[in-house]
Image: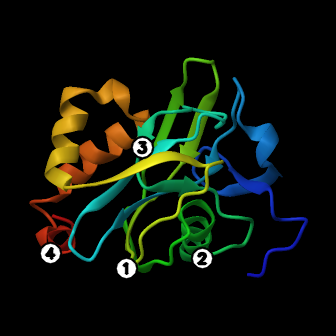
Amino acid sequence: MTATASTDDLVVLLDEVGAPCGTAPRRTVHSATTPLHLAFSCYLFSPTGLLLVTRRALSKTTWPGVWTNSFCGHPRPGEPMADAIERHAWTELGVEVEDVEPLLPDFRYRATDAGGVVENEFCPVWFAVTHQEPTPNPDEVAELRWVSTVDLGRAVAAAGWAFSPWMVDQVRQLAELVPAEPERLARAS
């Protein structure tokens, strides 16, 4: 779908079973009473298997300055998830992605940050690969690091408070997939 001005800043609202039930401007959605809405998280890998983690910009509405997965976002109404991932990879990190693949298609979470802002998202988790070095958008990313999945798992286990709550839950669930789907995770380790 080609974005138009009317859909550029809308998020897809969901009912309790995850079905679309409307849209709302993104700037109005995140509050103390955030409605359930559609999002995604993406874990971006280098060709050598290193994982990109990012620290959220200090200007972010939720969890400013917190370390998290490579990037997150909201698909626009009618936008295929893979297209939204490609768009956000470019907008936030200045990279093109390939091998975009869902790993936790039913991930959902609700969390409240220290400022009282709630995240309430149906947020499928995706993996992707880039062959480019990121050039982060400072409105989105304060800093970034390439790490091994083993080192990330150790860091989350030791200091989960330093990471976004969605990433902590995602890392735990992804770790549980390793025995079930080693071929899908082999390129990431």
Say which amino acid is labelled 3. Thr
Distance CA(mark 1)–CA(mark 4): 21 Å
Disc 3 from disc 1: Cα separation: 21 Å
The disc at residue 131 is: 1
The image position of residue 44, as x and y in percent, is: 38, 65
Residue 128 visible in the picture: yes
| Image height of 159 relative to 170, above or below | above
Q: Is residue 78 above or below residue 73?
A: below
Secondary-structure class at tag 4:
helix
Residue where numbered disc 3 is placed: 68
Q: What residue is drawn where x is 86% and y is 73%?
A: 4
Residue 16 image position (x, y, % from top left): 60, 43
Q: Is residue 185 left or right of residue 71?
A: left
Q: Report if the CB atoms under discs 2 and 3 are less than 8 Å apart.
A: no
Q: Residue furthest left?
A: 179
Residue 116 x, y percent position in the rendering: 63, 18
Residue found at the very far right of the displayed protein: 6
- Residue beneath disc 2: 83
Q: Which residue is mark 4?
A: 183
Q: Nearer the viewer, mark 1 or mark 4?
A: 1
Q: Nearer the viewer, residue 167 or 66?
A: 66
Q: Tag 3's secondary structure?
A: strand
Tell me which numbered mark, 3 or 1, is placed earlier along the sequence: 3
Query: How far apart are the two marked residues, 2 and 3, measured between alpha carbons?
Result: 21 Å
